[in-house]
Image (cartoon, grey):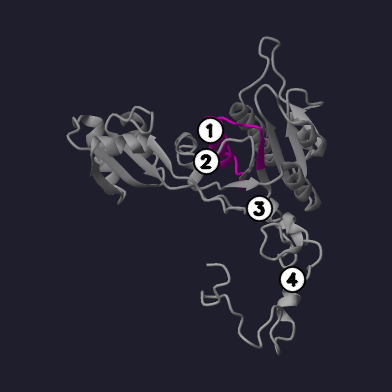
Amino acid sequence: MAGNSQRKGAIRKAGTKKGSTIGSGGQRRKGLEGRGPTPKAEDRKQHKAYKGDKPIRNTKATSKPATRERKPQMDVVVGRNPVVEALRAEVPATILHVAIGIDADERVREALDLASAQGLSIMEVGKAQIERIAGVALHQGLALTVKPYVYPESEEFIGNTDLVVALDGVTDPRNLGAVVRSAAAFGAAAVVLPERRSAGMTAVAWRTSAGAAARVPVARAVNLTRTINKFKKAGYFVIGLDAEGEMSMAAAAADTRDDRVLLVIGSEGKGLSRLVAEACDVVASIPMTADTESLNASVAAGIALYAIAEARAD
């Protein structure tokens, strides 16, 4: 009903009015005031783009991956004949793996006898396990785990030896083993290899050396040219052996009969690399007939070492 003053809310209580209450300090009014422009995203701590307190990232330190220490790799000889030959040559091995149920012929029995005599562990393994050990190679039920070769530093032989052999670019382990054998036969103290683009002392190289690898250490050089210069500073005369050499190996050996010698042998075909050849005091060659273009690296090494030994014996 119009003018009905009894309905709820129709009468204002005395002493009340709109606006801020007494004693509020105007807080409600202040809350309605503007706060200025919105800060940029990179200036707001709660925003993902905020950069104020984040540490500066060291890009130089994190751009390079952490270097891992190189661990020597285990070598494995597989197959009945290779395993027997390796055991005959007393290649330093650790375990002879024999497949369960293998047909034991003469080679298997000899491998077991040799492994037992050398104090090696003999393990019978299943087909799946010996296939994992052998990889894609034909194992014929036998696999021999060989100890990784420990290479000494080439600097160990500078100054206290009269004859050292270095190989430049020889990548066949059989050639390496044959060079080690010739080095032992003619009194060389060590064989030096570059770390890259070179054969290593695998079981094949050890077997080819016919046991000489146990007497003549094989060292590795990070940089062969720098190592040659270290030998030169220590008083060694460096003879490079290459088919394009300017003098005969016999003449070079005769001229250095009283000197300490580092004999550097290049690979078959390519010969010595340019930097290595430039580091040598002289580059010699082995005279041959026109029908033969080049000698195998191990054969050339044997001839050169023989020439040095003959010159020193006179």
Going from the N terminus, do you reach mark 4 or mark 3 first?
A: 4
Q: Secondary structure at mark 4?
A: loop
The reply to whether the C-beta atoms of the residues labelled 4 and 3 are less than 8 Å apart is no
Q: Secondary structure at mark 1?
A: helix
Q: CA distance from mark 1 to mark 3?
A: 22 Å
Q: Would you place residue 1 above or below residue 191 in this image?
A: below
**Mark in the foreground, 4 or 3:** 4
Q: Residue at x 26, y 46 (%)?
A: 122
Q: Secondary structure at mark 3?
A: helix
Q: CA distance from mark 1 to mark 2?
A: 7 Å
Question: Disc 3 marks which residue?
Answer: 157
Residue flagged by tag 1: what amino acid is it?
Answer: Pro
Q: Quadrant of residue 283?
A: top right
Residue 212 % position (x, y): 50, 42
Question: Disc 1 marks which residue?
Answer: 173
As drawn, the label of residue 32 is 4
Q: Secondary structure at mark 2?
A: loop
Q: CA distance from mark 3 to mark 2?
A: 18 Å
As drawn, the label of residue 201 is 2
